[in-house]
Amino acid sequence: MSDPVFKAHSNWPALVSDETQPWQTLSSQTLSGPPHVLHHDRVRTGPGHELSYVYRPRGPRAVFVVPITPAGEVVLIRQYRYPLQAWITEVVAGGMETGEEIWQSAARELREEVGGTAAQWVPLPGFYPQPSVSGAVFYPLLALGVTLGEARPEPDELIERLVMPLGEAYQRLLAGELLHGPGALALFYARAELEVRGLLPSQRLP
């Protein structure tokens, strides 16, 4: 797969550790291994103050894709989530594999989950999903001109493809019906770009 002249968002380089740290790590123990690594650290936060911290260390990265078809529809997914014991509506998403560039991960997940191929990629602001307990970094992207084919989800993924008008998706977002936090934020970040391109009517958020 060739590089689609992909450009990173301006905030992505800032999603790294600070050069100096106010807390001192006294000891560190790995509680569980891949794919979900957990550490248990003993940390000194200041003179005479120590605490135990269980967290997911920096390293895991994931992409979140808002796919838009040439007809101006958005492609979402309805996925069963075992920890929730429920189906929820999400955007296309998945963890980055070793050695992948961000756009490569996004293109792979788009192809696997909804059978999509994008004509253009627009990077959106990255973010930390759970900074109190996780060092994971999430990268949302807007995929434009998406054509749909046969999806090839992973064996452990139970996914239904949902194609709907953009207006309906944003009505559901504002009504609190999209319960997947990272997906909701990806849609929020995508809105301004969609309005600029005339794909979504400009409307002041409440």
Image (cartoon, grey):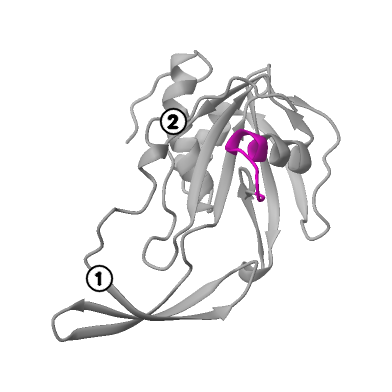
Per the image, the residue denoted by label 2 is 9
Residue at (27, 73) in percent of width and height: 24
Residue at 50% x, 34% y is: 170
Q: Is residue 199 left or right of residue 128?
A: right
Residue sitting at 57 percent across and 32 percent down? 168
- Residue at the far left: name it: 47
Q: Quadrant of the C terminus?
A: top left
Q: Is residue 187 above or below residue 53?
A: above
Amino acid type of the residue that numbered disc 1 sits on in the rendered structure = Trp
Q: Is residue 105 magenta?
A: yes
Q: Which residues are magenta?
A: 97-106
Q: Position of residue 86 (x, y in %)?
A: 66, 64
Image position of 32 with respect to 99: above or below = below
Around disc 2, counting alpha carbons within 10 Å, would you say few (fewer than 14), some (14 to 19), or many (20 or more)?
A: some
Is residue 201 something that shows in the picture?
A: no
Residue 203 in picture, x, y percent from top left: 38, 23
**Amino acid marked by disc 2:** His
Q: Nearer the viewer, residue 43 or 110?
A: 43
Q: Position of residue 192 (x, y in %)?
A: 41, 24
Task: List the residue tagged with mark 1.
Answer: 23
**Mark 1, residues whose alpha carbon is within 10 Å: few (<14), some, or many (≥20)?**
few
Q: Quadrant of residue 1?
A: top right
Say whether residue 148 is left or right of residue 133.
right
What kind of element bears circle 2? Answer: loop
First along the sequence among labels 2 and 1: 2
Could you say where residue 129 lies in the image, as x and y percent from the top left? 44, 55
Q: Nearer the viewer, residue 147 or 54?
A: 54
